[in-house]
Image (cartoon, grey):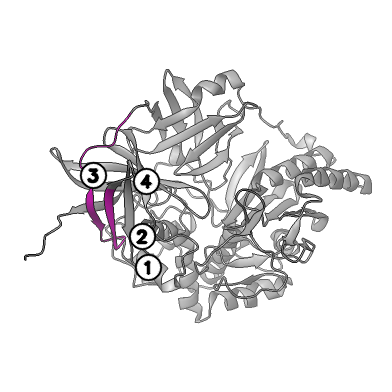
Amino acid sequence: MTDLDVTLLERRVDALLTPWANNAGPGVTLGVVLEGRLAVHRHAGLANIEHGVPIGPQTRFRIASVSKQFTCAAILMLAAEGKLSLEEEARTYLPELPALADRVAVAHLMHNTSGIRDMLEIMRHGGADLGTPIRLQDLVDGICRQRTLNFTPGTRFLYSNTNFLLLGLIVERLTGMKLEDMLEARIFAPLGMRDTRMTPDVHQAIPHLATGYFPGEPAGWRRAPHAFPLHGEGGLVSSVQDLALWSHNATTRAIGDGWLDGLTVQTPFANGTINRYARGLVVRPYRGLETVSHGGLWPGYRTEFLRVPALAATVIAISNAATSDPNLLAHRALDAVLETRPGARSMGVHPVPALPPKETLAPMAGRWLDPVSGATLDIAVSEAGIPTLATNGLTVTAEATEDGRFSSPRASSVFIVKPGGADVIEVEQDAGTVGRWQRVAEGAALPHGLSGTYHSPEMATRWTVTEADGGTWVRAEGPVANGQPWEMTPIAGDLIRINIPSMLFRAWLDVRVLRDGSTITGLQASGGRAKNVRYDRVEETTPEA
């Protein structure tokens, strides 16, 4: 690119960061790598509000799930050295894992097709949130209690942090080194990534680390609390400069020449549909170009790493403001690259797809139910005609697809929606599964007789359901915490919702009441990443006088 092209790109990026410029709150850093050079690196906002420290070139952030590609890199490195097989059962390397009816291979972990429940949701079932102090062993114990899976391995995709914690533990078992030491010696130090390190202890003081913030009530900002230990699923702190070095390695192959391409290898599901989740990275098209990306989300921190191999371009957006959207920022910056880079249009780049008109979207607002799984979806449409999708409490701004539908923009999920007729929408999810979801009618009531105690051995948790203050409430007693009361609300018939205030968003569980005839025998609860968890009703006995 010419100097004038870079200047234009800089100004486009500056315009994207305007909402965070000249304010006294947290902010964003955004970098654009072009042909191995960090051509644009801009910042706005404060790394630390209390001390008025601005975000700058050396600022580090918790990059959360962007860490996963490095854990997978370590696994591929060991596989290339003949120290493990991707097709071997994970229990071969971690014998403490339960013997399940279905075989879970190392490859299933890397592609998020294992069906193993997410450890953060396992903890949530027991009343623990990300601000609850726990140990790594608590997470491992929760994983090892599981006796059922979300699905048969290889048949579906479901994002699970458990997969990458286990991969990191496999690395440690095979090398005899801590994961952070192995990554430092084999990847970070050789590439000169001085700002990047794994930090299992979230309370450890890290030089130049930005503080993560949530919006305060009723105004201002508050520090985002977090206390869970971090490992192969999300334990890295890094900077735009270091991630630019890692991006450049995809071209130079200073390390990994024999295994680096393995990070972007996609494998099909059992039905032959391609899984866009490769190995710690997502491979999917954007405007006619193949992109390689991953996002990161941790209390007060959000990250997007977005690479376009055909353009030798990478966009890195990181924020310490929970209200920001680095995924959107990175794609708008990529749009600016496409519009300013000479020759980009000749590569068959498509226009940004337009959302359906508001008159098409507005009738879709409301609550929807998958009658097969019992999952629910909330759709809202703004005055400007912008739809949002909420599943299990996670709300995202939808983007248009090139075939006229709209979808979740989160690279780790597949959720595509279109009208399906009167009070019906058609929803496509992973593995090409398509369902017809029905509108939820108003006026439903909770089933009678819910009060009581329910127990799940897999969660090591008791739920006590009581009626009080005009509502019905659940209180969880888990292995590491006693949760606050969660409210139950009706959906339809024996389908209900349990609303869980969460550190990152207001989560909910979709719950089906289980019966033997008319008698309630249990509850079957599904969250975003832990499906069909069974709680059996416990008959309370009265002590003899």
- Reading the image, the residue beneath label 2 is 126
Mark 4 to mark 1 CA distance (whole Å):
21 Å
Work out whether residue 23 can be spotted: yes
Mark 1 Cα within 10 Å, few/some/many (few <14, many 20+)?
some
**Which residue was labeled with disc 4?**
487
Q: Which residue is mark 3?
A: 450
Amino acid carrying label 2: it is Gly
Give the image quarter of residue 392. Answer: top left
Which residue shows up at 41% across the image and 73% down it? 137
Do the numbered discs 4 and 1 sit on residues whose CB atoms are within 8 Å? no
Q: Nearer the viewer, residue 455 or 350?
A: 455
Foreground of the two, 36 or 434: 434
Nearer the N terminus, badge 1 or badge 3? 3
Left or right of 19, for residue 4: right
**Which circle marks residue 480 in the picture?**
1
**Residue 447 among magenta residues:** yes
Q: Is residue 464 left or right of residue 245?
A: left
In the image, is residue 494 above or below residue 532? Answer: above
Q: Are marks 2 and 3 in contact (CB under 8 Å)?
A: no
Tell me the distance, in whole angstroms, between the alpha carbons under discs 3 and 4: 12 Å
**Tag 1–tag 2 contact (CB < 8 Å):** yes
Image location of residue 425, percent across then percent down: 44, 26
Residue at the image position 68 percent from the left and 55 percent from the top: 319
